[in-house]
Amino acid sequence: MKKITKFVVLGIVALLVVILAADSFATVPVGSTGILLTFGKVEDGKALSEGLHIKLPLVQRIVSMDNRVKKLELNTEAFSKDIQTVSATLAVNYRLQAEKSFAIYKTHGTQYEQNIIVPATHEVLKSVCAQYTAEELISKRAESSDMMRDELDAKLSGMGITVTDFNIIDFDFSDEFINAVEAKQVAEQVKKKAATENETAIAQAEREKQVSIKQSEAEAERVRIEAEAQAQSTLIAAQAQADAVKLAADAEAYRMQNEGKYVSSALIDKVLAENWDGKLPSMVGGDVKGILNVDSLLDESETE
């Protein structure tokens, strides 16, 4: 019995030694920071890096704070500048700063997401939405998203949390506002269509005007060319006719001049004789000056 009791005691002691030895070591995972606790109390300045660490068994324990990037997705509401209800689904990517993991755990424990990040995100959404109208939140979505990310990062950075990315997954508004936006968009489309049609009509009228001007100018030019050609043709014809008349007159004058040179008194007498009707003229002219009465000359001759 003594031997059995001894073996049992040794077994228990060995088991306790194994348990205590196993509990004397703890591992901090990769990408994490270890927080050493003694009877649940945070040991100041005892932030542990990743790897294997020794601790007092049954007295101390190590809590790991993950410093890798995490994603938080939440739904929240706010009011726009024009007092429209904005329902948003946001996605926040963040990570704990390793050097401040100890302070975060000491202040908020492992509930830092609910205690710090979620309230800060709600506050930032309300702050940014109040600076934009509902329509601007839609049309300037990227701008408002960047503003939210910058404000959230500035707010959380001092607490040991870095915002690596921020996205607005969805914006939603009241049915009345959506219907009003749709009606406005339809009206703007109709207005743009009318403006486009008006511009097209003006452009078409301008093109037709230019074509008409070109046609009128071409017709006027054609008429001018034809008139000039006709005038030139008439001038040439008149000039030719005048030249012909002048040549004919010159030829006739030349002929008469040449014929006059060859007319003799004998020829004149011959012509007169051929054309005489047998009666003596009562008046004759000759070398004497004046006009002689042939009948008086005959009477005077008989008297003598």
Image: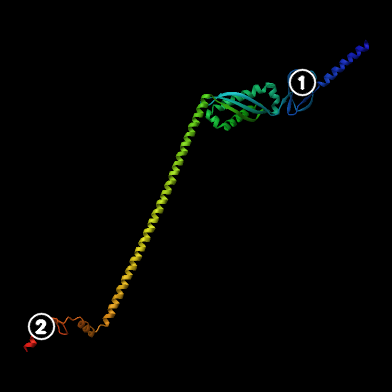
Please tell me whether mark 1 or mark 2 is closer to you in this view.
2
Q: Earlier in the sequence, mark 1 or mark 2?
A: 1
Which residue is at a point 38% across and 56% down the rendered structure image? 223
Disc marking residue 218: none
Q: Mark 1 packing: few (<14 Cα in 10 Å), some, or many (20+)?
A: many
Residue 280 in which image quadrant = bottom left
Q: Mark 2 packing: few (<14 Cα in 10 Å), some, or many (20+)?
A: few
Residue lying farthest to the bottom in this orientation: 304
Residue lying farthest to the top in this orientation: 1
- Residue at image mark 1: 61
Q: Amino acid at mark 1?
A: Arg
- Residue at image mark 2: 295
| SS assignment at label 2 | helix
Of 227 and 263, which appears nearest the observer? 263
* On-image quarter of the N terminus: top right
Q: Is residue 28 left or right of residue 221?
A: right
Above or below residue 191? Residue 59 is above
User: How many callouts does the rendering have?
Assistant: 2
Which residue is at a point 47% across and 34% down the rendered structure image? 191
Q: Amino acid at mark 2?
A: Asp
Measured from the top left, where is residue 21 in percent x and y? 83, 21
Q: CA distance from mark 1 to mark 2?
A: 189 Å
Of 101 and 87, which appears nearest the observer? 87
Q: Is residue 75 visible?
A: yes
Measured from the top left, where is residue 98 in percent x and y? 71, 28
